[in-house]
Amino acid sequence: MKKLVYYILLSISALSFSACTDYINVDKYFYDQVSLDSAFSKRIYVDGWLSSAYSVMNKLGEYKEPFRWASDDLYHPDMKEYVEGSYSADKPKGDENAGESRLWKYYEGIRKASTFLDNVDRCPELTMDEIADMKGQARFLRAYCYWALIRVFGPVPLIPLEGLDADLSYEELSLPRTHFDEIVSFIDTELAETARLLPMRRTVNNLGRPTRGAALGLRARVLLYAASPLYNGNLDFFNVVDNKGNQLISQTYDESKWAKAAAAAKDVIELAKTSGLYELYTIAPKIGTLDMYRPPVHPEYSTKDYPDGWANIDPLLSYKSNFDGSVQGSKNPELIFTRTSDGTGTINDWMYQALPRTISGNNRLCVTQKQVNAYAMNDGRTISEAANTGDYVTTGFTTEAYSENNPFLPAKVSLMYNKREPRFYASIAYNGSVWEAASASEPRYRNQQIFYYRGTEDGKQGFKEECPLTGMTLKKFYNSEDSRTDGGYVIEKTEMTIRYAEILLIYAEALNELSEGEVYHLKTYSNEDVEIKRDEDEMRYAIKRIRMRAGVPDYTNETYKNQADFRVKLKRERQVELLGENSMRYFDLRRWKDALTEENQLLQGCNINISDDDTYIADFYKETPVSSVHKVFEQRMYLFPFPTYELKRNVNLTQNPGW
């Protein structure tokens, strides 16, 4: 234990934890090494230790993962090595300049949390209720760290809670990898028990601390991952073994894993129903505003209120406001858990990567053509279905000028972006989109219509590709006030680390994978009996809420009855609804075992080599491969390699196959 640095937070600031961005950003405080007895003798020291455990999640959180821009939905040139498969165990992208590996950092969080749990009871200044809450937080953090490890590497060493010399360092422990199902079972149990310790709500100043819903939400996410094809009877993983040759991933398919995932999601849904804590965020329509972007009249949904229709909500703003800072996290019923949103790699940094050069952005983050094509038309049809009736076209341009009521389709925008579903306009910046930059002090920066034609300020210039290589970028986390020009500012956003929409999608997906007629009798997190089966009404309960909020018609009865058809639509729903959140698409393609097909497709977008010359301007919109990027995905890439230096530090750690 002496080789694990023990820190005490000496600043009195630790007592207040004034905001989630303060209490998990511990680097700014001064630390000193002390004895273990002293570290847990006072409340201020205990707070500092717990804060230090939070700092691991802050430094290595979802929006900082290198996978965030390396799938088939988003691309950034900084992630080229990932997309082209040129990383290796000797040079794992994202670690080579870090000084110490990402793997070790997560284990640092695990050790800090475990040490906290072993010693917090000795603090005389804490009440029993405070200790119970703090233990719940530490157990959540430890489970979160294990989850972050297994989704990247697969089976990893699980540090026993008892029976080891606490003075031993990670290197001295030298533990072998643990069977995947055993790690998942540990996380499952930890989070279920933790949920019973944690409070239902947090104060505004403690928004970033986990609650009961956060523990249950993370549990549902982990169990869905464990039930998916990558780890549920995946014969391709026969050679993932420990140092004694024991297989670490079950070779037998177990449908009950899907039932457990459904039950875990149902725990959150029932909590939402009984407490009123969680629901999808909605906004009432404003008369005369954005009328042209409302869904077309539907005989059923246009006259019914949410969740049975969209008569009383604005689907576009309801979705958009979740991500652009329009609503505070503490006032958003969709938010289940958040970490922090300041610093490099978080949401505001994402927006810097997407913002046009015209308003002082980096201008390099891309949205792929595949992602754009995934969005439906405003009547719910796919673009292929609409093309068959002439309602989706790829030629021609809009003519109506930009205005408050027409912010998304001003003149000179391709008609291929016309009449798309509300989530499309809330998420995608295409050629000709307007960036309002309302906070800019100089009028010339406001309401700029940005084009990515070759030779324009934001397009390709000469041989320099300092622009979105697909001619499209991300606008999901952009607020109309955001501007990085002199005098401008960027609205703070709340990171949606876990939100209710994801839970609904987990529930629907897990139920769909159950065989017709099979009934599973399981236990809730509070040890009550629950019956789980493939129930179309329950699946509809989850999906219809998401579809109505999005302003698109619900699936047909035939789709709910057809497991294969529902699976296809569910995958697209996740692709659209969860774009840019928590590297979801990257890990979805892997857990579904779809990556070998999907990730080997060409990275395509608009043709950024075309200028705005009227003679050839239509060629800009022809689907064109990005010639400077050569996507590669191989079987071995389903699991990330352990860095070579980690294998040297832990002689019992076995490498993933193919590396």
Image (cartoon, rainbow, N blue to C red):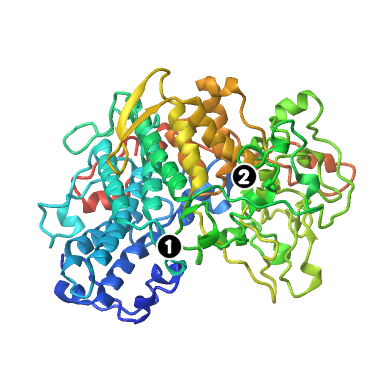
Residue 51 visible here? yes
Residue drawn at 68 percent across, 47 percent down? 313
**Location of residue 399 in the rendering, given as x and y in whole percent from the top left corner:** 90, 47
84 and 117: which is toward the camera: 117
Residue 3 visible here? no
**Location of residue 305 in the rendering, given as x and y in whole percent from the top left corner:** 66, 42
* Of callouts 1 and 2, the N-terminal one: 1
Crowding at mark 2 (Cα within 10 Å: few <14, some 14-19, many 20+): few
Query: Viewed as shown, does residue 482 lie left or right of 221?
Result: right
**Location of residue 244 in the rendering, given as x and y in whole percent from the top left corner:** 16, 35
Tag shown at residue 628: 2
Residue drawn at 39 percent across, 41 percent down? 267
Q: Evaluate if marks 1 and 2 touch, with contact meaning CB atoms under 8 Å apart.
A: no
**Location of residue 410 in the rendering, given as x and y in whole percent from the top left corner:** 83, 51
Residue drawn at 30 percent across, 81 percent down? 10
- Residue 100 figure quarter: bottom left
Query: Viewed as shown, does residue 166 lie left or right of 463?
Result: left
Whole-Å distance between the Cαs marked 1 and 2?
Answer: 40 Å
333 and 386: which is toward the camera: 333
Dividing the image into 4 quarters, which one contains the N terminus?
Answer: bottom left
Dividing the image into 4 quarters, which one contains the C terminus?
Answer: top left
Q: Secondary structure at mark 2?
A: loop
Q: Secondary structure at mark 1?
A: loop
465 and 105: which is toward the camera: 105
User: What amino acid does circle 2 point to?
Assistant: Ser
User: What amino acid does circle 1 point to?
Assistant: Gly
Tag shown at residue 208: 1
521 and 142: which is toward the camera: 521
- Residue 18 figure quarter: bottom left
